[in-house]
Amino acid sequence: MVKQEVRRFTIRLLNTADSFACRSDESVLYAMELLGYRGIPVGCRGGGCGVCRVRVRSGQYTVRKMSRACVSEAEEAVGVVLACKLIPHSDLDLEVLGKMLKCLSAARSAPETPHAARMKAPR
């Protein structure tokens, strides 16, 4: 069995101008959680609740199985997916949607967590 190389990609959130790293073997939602923002809606993490809806504006990716009640085929065709099921294959530009956008906007105005400050610190 050939093991695939794990790569790191830059994910840019167009709504907030934030960017973060995401590995090729993890979901974008998981990488967002590592940012340390309070209030990021994670929901079920299984593709069934629709809380983590985003629109991919550019980049290569795959999505794992998502509930059609959350993302229709027509929406998926224009890049709307669930961040919990979104796996990057290149750098991605994303637009956060719905509840996630509200939560990210609120998190940006909240005091920064120690973990988030460490992630931004130069090494």
Image (cartoon, helix red, strand yellow):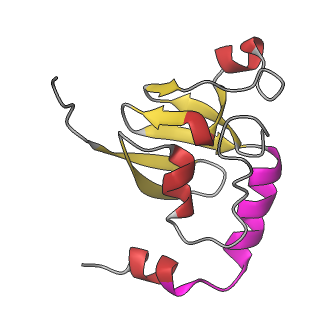
Name the outermost residue toward the front.
Answer: 1
**Residue appearing at x 76%, y 43% in the figure:** 97
Whether 45 is drawn above or below 107: the answer is: above
Residue 32 at what x, y percent from top left?
A: 54, 57
**Residue appearing at x 72%, y 77% in the figure:** 109
Residue 23 at what x, y percent from top left?
A: 36, 46
Q: Residue 46: within the magenta?
A: no
Give the extent of the magenta segment.
Answer: 98-114
Left or right position of 57 against 15: left
Whether 99 is drawn above or below 77: the answer is: below
Residue 96 at what x, y percent from top left?
A: 69, 45
Q: Could you say which quadrant of the image residue 5 lies in?
A: top left
**Residue appearing at x 74%, y 51% in the figure:** 43
Q: Could you say which quadrant of the image residue 82 lies in?
A: top right
Q: Residue 99: within the magenta?
A: yes
Whether 110 is drawn above or below 64: the answer is: below
> Quadrant where the C terminus lies?
bottom left
Left or right position of 86 against 2: right
> Quadrant where the N terminus lies?
top left
Count of numbered badges drawn on the protein: 0
Residue 12 at what x, y percent from top left?
A: 50, 48
Q: Could you say which quadrant of the image residue 21 lies in?
A: bottom left
Left or right position of 108 against 64: right
Q: Between 23 and 56, which is closer to the camera in this rendering?
A: 23
Overall secondary structure of the magenta stretch? Answer: helix
